[in-house]
Image (spheres, grey):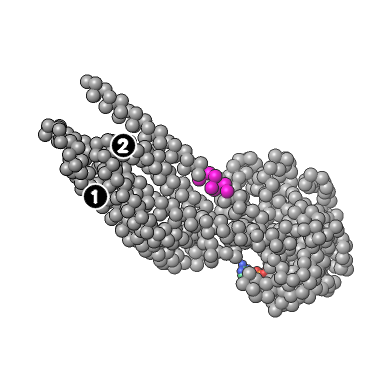
């Protein structure tokens, strides 16, 4: 009865102990994932660096997003398994070492410890190739996932162009490459698995050696044969259990190789981010110094030369002063560097010569609108104040309605129902490209910067809406710097910068004839509203009143 009770107590205590260790491992894994991910978010998603690592280093640093979203999780999971094992094993090793020493003398533990040391050294050499194989497997995993994400992103284009077969072939090929790297991991793990299994089987053989030593040395000579058999069975149990515990520790080697594979991918990303951030500190435009900020409100390019990240010259010796009130259009053939000028202006690309001087409050004064604006997840209110989510509560419902009206998106009110309803669907699926561009203009009209840098930001809009957007910019005193291909847009501007695609550029005023050609009938003026009388006429007709405070715009109808 006593044995039964003590056995039950031991079973409960062991069960409780193991579940506590399991809980601890789980919590530790969560905490590891949280702190590592937050650390990477901090060093990865930061101004300019984020863009640079994705656009310029994707050859060396594949799929940084997968490293952060999946590899960190795998690191945390591998650590959990190792820790669960390593928390219990040392205690059991200590306990059975003591038992083994008591029964078999120092020879028993000595044999087992020597065996363990030799096995650890061998497994150390077997782990190295697994680490590399895991690294490449994770890389292939990243590409496979990336391919599927791209399919999702471009479903419509793929379907329209009947590209399903090509997509399937690409997906199959990527899967094959992933599976072959997985197979490589399996092959590389084979010697380690073989060694681990051998170590555990050797335990039983060793136990007979350990039993034999004290018996042949005469330690149990005085005992009757019945007690000797009990001693033999006890020593073999203790030594076998001790060997088993060591084999568990060696088994952690497999976890360790996984851990090392994932960690090396994270380490590589960390090194690249570190290198880039040092590189960026040396580029003035990224963190404008006092001398590259002008006291007036203009944006100045002074003898600026810049190239692609691959080193091909794009524009040479570009000097221009973008003045508030002078709308400028940038034109040129495909690939001539129109968007690149904006990249340089935004500090995304460095200059190799010259300097860019920005207005003092450049973050507030300049807003960039790309062709495909980023649609954030969340409420309509948050969409409109993006990227300043914290300001969402300061936009009233009336403001939202007015902004939507300005960009002709009133119907969105019916679609979303409530301005504060979190929209879990992808906004890019809900809105057409033209509507997304209009929403971006609503953000612009809410923020009302001095300059709006528009990179084909109206290319998906109908011509009436397009004209309306430029008219509203004029009404709100937002100066447009526009990259476009449509000659019809030139009438909304007073200056034209033309790139020739060979590094050369020229600047000219948009002629009266040009304005007439597109239906305007005025002289060109620089430095104010005088350059666009067509707008002024519209303005008078619409009797629009602008509230200059708090980012709100009112119609006084
Ligand atoms: N991340 C990059 N790495 C290397 N080269 C790039 C990169 N981005 C752009 N380029 C190259 O820089 C050149 C200028 O590109 P940019 O996007 O400025 O052209 P663009 O005049 O705006 O063209 P488009 O009219 O087609 O929009 C192109 O030859 C392009 O291939």
Determine crowd level at label 1: few under 14, some 14-19, many 20+ residues with C-alpha closer than 10 A. some
The one nearer the camera, 160 or 307, is: 307
Which residue, as the protein is rendered here, is positioned at the far bottom?
502
The one nearer the camera, 157 or 102, is: 102
Q: Is residue 259 above or below residue 525?
A: above
List x then y, in percent, for residue 98. Answer: 31, 36
Q: Is residue 513 above or below residue 202?
A: below
Majority secondary structure in the magenta region: helix
Which residue, as the protein is rendered here, is positioned at the far left?
225
Determine crowd level at label 2: few under 14, some 14-19, many 20+ residues with C-alpha closer than 10 A. some
Find numbered disc 1 in the image and state the secondary structure of the residue it sits on: helix
Q: Are marks 2 and 1 in contact (CB under 8 Å)?
A: no
List x then y, in percent, for residue 95. Answer: 33, 36
Residue range corresponding to the magenta coloring: 33-39
Report the residue at 40% width, 37% height from top. Answer: 22
The one nearer the camera, 296 or 94, is: 94
195 left or right of 427 in image: left
State yes or no: Cβ of the residue under disc 2 lies below 8 Å from any atom of ligand 1: no
Q: Is residue 215 above or below residue 260?
A: above
Q: Label 2, label 1: how many angstroms apart (C-alpha)?
A: 21 Å
The one nearer the camera, 437 or 280, is: 280
List x then y, in percent, for residue 263. Answer: 48, 54
Find numbered disc 2 in the image and state the secondary structure of the residue it sits on: helix
Q: Which residue is mark 2?
A: 98
Residue 428 shows up from this direction: yes
Q: Which residue is mark 1?
A: 202
Residue 19 location, quadrant: top left
Q: Which mark is residue 163?
A: none
Report the residue at 60% width, 58% height from top. Answer: 274
Between disc 2 and disc 1, whose residue precedes?
2
């Amino acid at each position: 009865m006593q044995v039964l009770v003590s056995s039950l107590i031991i079973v409960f205590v062991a069960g409780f102990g193991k579940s506590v260790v399991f809980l601890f491992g789980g919590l530790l894994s969560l905490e590891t994932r949280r702190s590592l991910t937050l650390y990477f978010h901090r060093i990865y998603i930061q101004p300019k660096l984020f863009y640079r690592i994705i656009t310029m280093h994707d050859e060396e640093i594949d799929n940084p997003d997968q490293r952060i979203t999946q590899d960190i999780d795998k690191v945390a999971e591998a650590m959990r398994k190792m820790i669960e094992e390593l928390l219990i094993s040392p205690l059991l090793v200590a306990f059975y070492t003591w038992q083994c020493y008591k029964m078999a003398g120092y020879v028993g533990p000595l044999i087992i410890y020597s065996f363990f040391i030799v096995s650890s050294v061998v497994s150390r050499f077997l782990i190295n190739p697994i680490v590399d194989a895991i690294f490449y497997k994770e890389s292939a995993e990243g590409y496979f996932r990336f391919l599927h994400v791209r399919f999702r992103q471009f479903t419509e284009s793929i379907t329209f162009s009947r590209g399903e077969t090509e997509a399937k072939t690409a997906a199959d090929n990527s899967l094959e490459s992933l599976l072959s790297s997985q197979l490589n991991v399996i092959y590389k793990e084979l010697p380690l698995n073989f060694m681990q299994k051998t170590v555990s089987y050797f335990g039983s053989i060793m136990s007979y050696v350990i039993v034999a030593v004290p018996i042949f040395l005469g330690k149990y000579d005085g005992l009757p044969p019945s007690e000797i058999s009990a001693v033999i069975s006890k020593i073999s149990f203790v030594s076998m259990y001790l060997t088993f515990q060591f084999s568990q520790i060696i088994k952690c080697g497999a976890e360790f190789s996984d851990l090392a594979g994932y960690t090396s991918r994270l380490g590589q990303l960390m090194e690249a981010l570190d290198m880039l951030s040092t590189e960026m500190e040396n580029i003035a435009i990224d963190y404008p110094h006092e001398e590259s900020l002008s006291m007036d409100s203009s944006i100045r390019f002074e003898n600026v030369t810049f190239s692609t990240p691959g080193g091909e010259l794009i524009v040479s010796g570009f000097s221009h002063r973008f003045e508030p009130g002078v709308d400028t259009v940038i034109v040129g053939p495909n690939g001539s560097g129109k968007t690149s000028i904006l990249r340089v202006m935004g500090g995304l690309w460095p200059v190799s010569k010259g300097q860019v001087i920005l207005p003092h409050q450049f973050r507030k004064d300049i807003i960039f609108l790309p062709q495909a604006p980023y649609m954030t997840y969340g409420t309509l209110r948050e969409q409109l104040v993006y990227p300043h989510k914290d300001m969402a509560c300061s936009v009233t419902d009336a403001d939202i309605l007015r902004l939507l009206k300005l960009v002709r998106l009133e119907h969105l009110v019916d679609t979303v129902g409530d301005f504060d309803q979190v929209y879990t669907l992808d906004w890019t699926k809900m809105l057409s490209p033209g509507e997304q561009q209009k929403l971006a203009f609503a953000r612009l009209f809410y923020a009302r910067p001095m300059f709006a840098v528009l990179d084909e930001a109206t290319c998906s809009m109908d011509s009436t809406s397009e004209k309306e957007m430029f008219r509203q910019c004029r009404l709100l005193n937002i100066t447009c710097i526009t990259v476009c291909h449509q000659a019809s847009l030139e009438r909304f501007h007073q200056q034209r910068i033309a790139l020739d695609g060979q590094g050369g550029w020229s600047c000219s005023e948009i002629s009266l004839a040009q304005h007439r050609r597109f239906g305007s009938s005025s002289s060109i003026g620089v430095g104010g509203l005088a350059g666009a009388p067509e707008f002024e006429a519209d303005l008078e007709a619409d009797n629009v009143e602008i509230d200059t405070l708090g980012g709100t715009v009112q119609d006084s109808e």
